[in-house]
Image (tube, coloured by chain):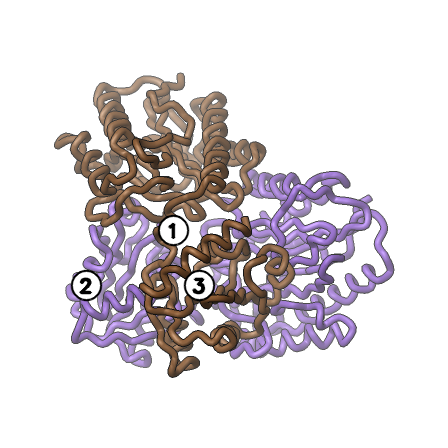
Chain colours: A purple, B brown
Amino acid sequence: MNSSCGSRIKALRKNFGSHHVDGILFSNMSNIRYLSGFTGSDGVLILSSDHAILLVDGRYATQAEAESKIASVHPYQNKMEGIEQGIAKLGIKEIGFEAGHISMETFQDLSRRLEGKGFVPLGDPLRFLRARKDKNEIAVMKKAASIGSAAINALIREIKIGWTEKEAALHLEMIARRGGADQIAFETIFASGAHSALPHAKPTNRKVQKGDFVVIDFGVRYQGYCSDETCTVAFGELTGDQKNAYRAVRQAHDESIGSVKAGTAAADVDALTRRVLGKKYRDYFVHGTGHGVGLEVHEAPRLAPNSPDALAEGMVVTIEPGLYYPGAWGIRIEDTVVVNKNGCDVITKMDKGLIIIE
Amino acid sequence: MNSSCGSRIKALRKNFGSHHVDGILFSNMSNIRYLSGFTGSDGVLILSSDHAILLVDGRYATQAEAESKIASVHPYQNKMEGIEQGIAKLGIKEIGFEAGHISMETFQDLSRRLEGKGFVPLGDPLRFLRARKDKNEIAVMKKAASIGSAAINALIREIKIGWTEKEAALHLEMIARRGGADQIAFETIFASGAHSALPHAKPTNRKVQKGDFVVIDFGVRYQGYCSDETCTVAFGELTGDQKNAYRAVRQAHDESIGSVKAGTAAADVDALTRRVLGKKYRDYFVHGTGHGVGLEVHEAPRLAPNSPDALAEGMVVTIEPGLYYPGAWGIRIEDTVVVNKNGCDVITKMDKGLIIIE
């Protein structure tokens, strides 16, 4: 991973000129991991045009030394003091920072400490770099996706009417962890009956019943990278309305995936999803069509109305149309795909045909 | 929970005058949950002196309506626009915000949108309020602690030399989830041998061996609240040095807990811990003595050198001295306690005597 870190830092330094900086301070831990290999939960990375300093607190000193080969590790007693000294040591005059991540409080403190230096607010300087995954990252993400899909598949083979949502979610997570997942990537959604109409339902003690749609939205973390997949399965009989709605979401999902390729505007994929859902359904689709996935489960690009992003080779994005009828039921179908020149590779592995469990 | 929300908001509004505001904007989700009952992962709460608006995106509209009785729920298309409209609707002129939580980018966007309004950066306006738990919160936290302790106890009874760290961590989490935990509160630490010298080690495929110290730092989340406890157990024979070190940490732990009561300075508890560890050990204690626990696993107060905090009745804090010898071994012993007038109640339940597993 550390050779990738070197080339990422090189690519980033090429942008120093256009950012009007001679150094950048990172506090977003995913960005720090991406650039340095350090996997801790707290720290600061300062890059100048020829050096890098990784500031960590005492708890992380040994780990940081072991993980990061590209930066010299400086343990600090007081983080703000450490940053002040690090910037001075590297002789940085115009320092860029992640404006969407650094808090007002930290900004004010640093401004006081570093009077005379230029502070340059940057949108996430790694947004585009991190969005396009390299071969190693894609290999890791395929493995993550396959662990997640295998777990969903195993759950669906075992689950029966009468299981509680909590039991099912726990069982799913256990299968995935035994299958090689380091952790889950986000709180598992296993939402049955009326709960399936809540896009972000938490598992409850409700028992799965005949006539339920169950939305299973599940992701694992593997070597730092996330997977993200959603299946909606049915228990027993469905009504004609439910079957038609499932068909509509499936069609929106399939056609959207069919439209993904390098160069396409992310907003156009979202618009297509809404067009395919049509007048009858689109008002019940209450979120965006998808998002990038990587070290974070939600990262660039954004596939939504008004998104300024364009898809590019190597981006890994979700396509996840859904319908939500509050108090009644909901459906979501989601795959994760890798964008390539002429289309995309679907890396999540569950078949999205309607599964009815008796 | 919603009657607690009402009295919390009442207490907060009493401070509007001293903050020089007639409203506060909250974006920290733990603060929003504390004040409104809403448990989602994204949203904004705006309080004026007589109204409250909870802004959520479309995914959370139904859930927010169900969970929050104290605020009117406004779904937004664009968050910044929603905030602008909410503040206008409530007629707020001087709006406070969480300076340690709001990003520079958000601050700049809001400043542009709300020209003419006063923006007042506040330290966390709930820091002290949230630090002191009420009876209901303490009851929930006791339950969380007992689920966590029971899981550690069950693991220790089953584990044998040869288990991998990952297997053990997974097993521990599964026991806790089956025991009633909603989730784990933080990534489980099960660090054996030289890994025990890393305060924040992640579980690996290393197998537990004879002569190992194993540091188990584990917490569950139950009804939103976290537990936090650390046991260090030994496998097979220990050296005299290891036994002496364990005794020293145990003594520091016990004496620190003995010193906890309402009115004591948090920095004094930390100083006592270091004094008891003494010259021989204190340089190997690389973190603070403890921290508050609640809706977040780390919250106010801070028990560390230079902490300005004083302990108060109802605070729930950890006491967790440790020693770390890089490349060799480490020890940490941690309990969570509720501060009361004359001392404290230890709510984590594992006995901290040295356990040697053959």
Helix, strand or loop status at disc 1: helix
Q: Chain of mark 1?
A: B
The verdict on a common chain for dots 3 and 1 is: yes
Q: Is residue A220 visible?
A: no
Q: State how many labels appear.
A: 3
Along the horizontal axis of the image, is B326 left or right of B222?
left
Q: Nearer the viewer, residue B138 or B19?
A: B19
**Residue B222: mark:** none
Q: At label 1, which amino acid type do we have?
A: Leu
Residue B34 lies, with reference to residue B259, above or below; the image says below
Mark in front: 2 vs 3: 3
Q: Dividing the picture into quarters, in which one does residue A86 lie?
A: bottom left
Circle 1 is placed at which residue position? B129
Residue A259 lies, with reference to residue B163, above or below; the image says below
Q: Nearer the viewer, residue B11 or A113?
A: B11
Provide residue B24's location: percent of width, then percent of height. Answer: 42, 66
Provide residue B28's location: percent of width, then percent of height. Answer: 43, 59
Q: Chain of mark 3?
A: B
**Residue B26: mark:** 3
Q: Nearer the viewer, residue B19 or B96?
A: B19
Circle 2 is placed at which residue position? A84
Provide residue A128's location: percent of width, then percent of height. Answer: 44, 71
Residue at the location (51% across, 72% down)?
B79
Along the horizontal axis of the image, is A4 left or right of B91?
left
Residue A190 lies, with reference to residue A269, above or below; the image says above
Helix, strand or loop status at disc 2: helix
Residue at the location (56% across, 65% down)?
B56
Residue at the location (40% across, 41% down)?
B202
Do the residues bearing badges 2 and 1 touch, measured as CB atoms within 8 Å? no
Work out how far the residue at label 2 is from the one at label 1, CA to CA, in angstroms. 32 Å
Work out how far the residue at label 2 is from the one at label 3, CA to CA, in angstroms. 29 Å
